[in-house]
Amino acid sequence: MAAHAAGDPQAFSELVRRHRDRMWAVALRTLRDPEEAADALQDAFISAFRGAANFRAESQVTTWLHRIVVNACLDRIRRRQARPTVPLPETGFNEPATPRDSISDRETNLVVTAALDQLPEDQRAPIVLVDVEGYSVSETAKLLGIAEGTVKSRCARGRAKLAKVLGHLRNPDAIANVPTSESKRSPRREA
């Protein structure tokens, strides 16, 4: 440490080489995360490099470095608690399995628009207002001048029709993934 304070350019490298494994173990035990421990250890060695002139030799270099590493770890813990983060999953809920391009999005938009055009006007208007434009049921009822229950029932009937027409978008491997009224009936037994 005295050689580093005196200006020896290789002295601090030797200190790091001698103490890094022990200091790494301290950081890892304290933080329990290899990436955080590596960052804390780097911060600690930078602090030690800059503060070497303040080393008073009242303790061993190992003890002094240990204290700097622990403080760097505690600083990271405090920062993490002040700004807690939650890791994002690699694939999340409602995210496409594969990236989509603008051409396929445009094609999907055309298919959905064509399906909406097949609906009767009394079902299409509530679905467009609620599902596409994002209005609430009560706002839609006021806009269309009908009861909220009517908006809900028309949306439900329209969605059922759209599910049959657009089922292939949700599950491209299935020919039709929405059961029809005929497929819900139990098969007849032959005598």
Image (cartoon, rainbow, N blue to C red):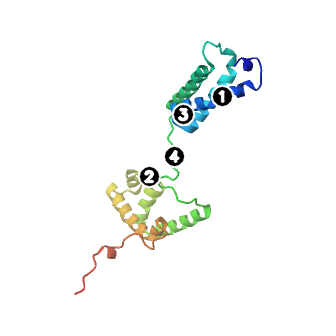
Q: Report the disc number at residue 105.
A: none
Foreground residue among 146 and 106:
106
Q: Earlier in the sequence, mark 1 or mark 4?
A: 1
Q: Earlier in the sequence, mark 2 or mark 1?
A: 1
Q: Is residue 123 visible?
A: yes
Q: Earlier in the sequence, mark 3 or mark 2?
A: 3
In this rendering, is residue 51 above or below 113?
above
Residue topped by disc 2 = 135
Question: Which of label 3 and label 2 is nearer to you?
Answer: 3
x, y percent for residue 14: 70, 27
Q: Secondary structure at mark 4?
A: loop
Disc 2 marks a residue whose amino acid type is Tyr
Residue topped by disc 4 = 88
Residue extending furthest toward the front: 18
Foreground residue among 184 and 16:
16
Disc 4 marks a residue whose amino acid type is Leu
Question: Label 1 crowding class (10 Å Cα cut-off): few <14, some 14-19, many 20+?
Answer: few
Disc 3 marks a residue whose amino acid type is Leu
The residue sitting at 56% across, 38% down in the picture is: 34
Q: Secondary structure at mark 2?
A: loop
Q: Report the disc number at residue 28.
A: 3
Mark 3 and mark 2 in contact? Answer it, CB < 8 Å: no
Residue topped by disc 1 = 18
The residue sitting at 51% across, 46% down in the picture is: 88
Disc 1 marks a residue whose amino acid type is Arg
Q: Earlier in the sequence, mark 3 or mark 1?
A: 1
Separation of marks 2 and 4 at Cα, in angstroms: 30 Å
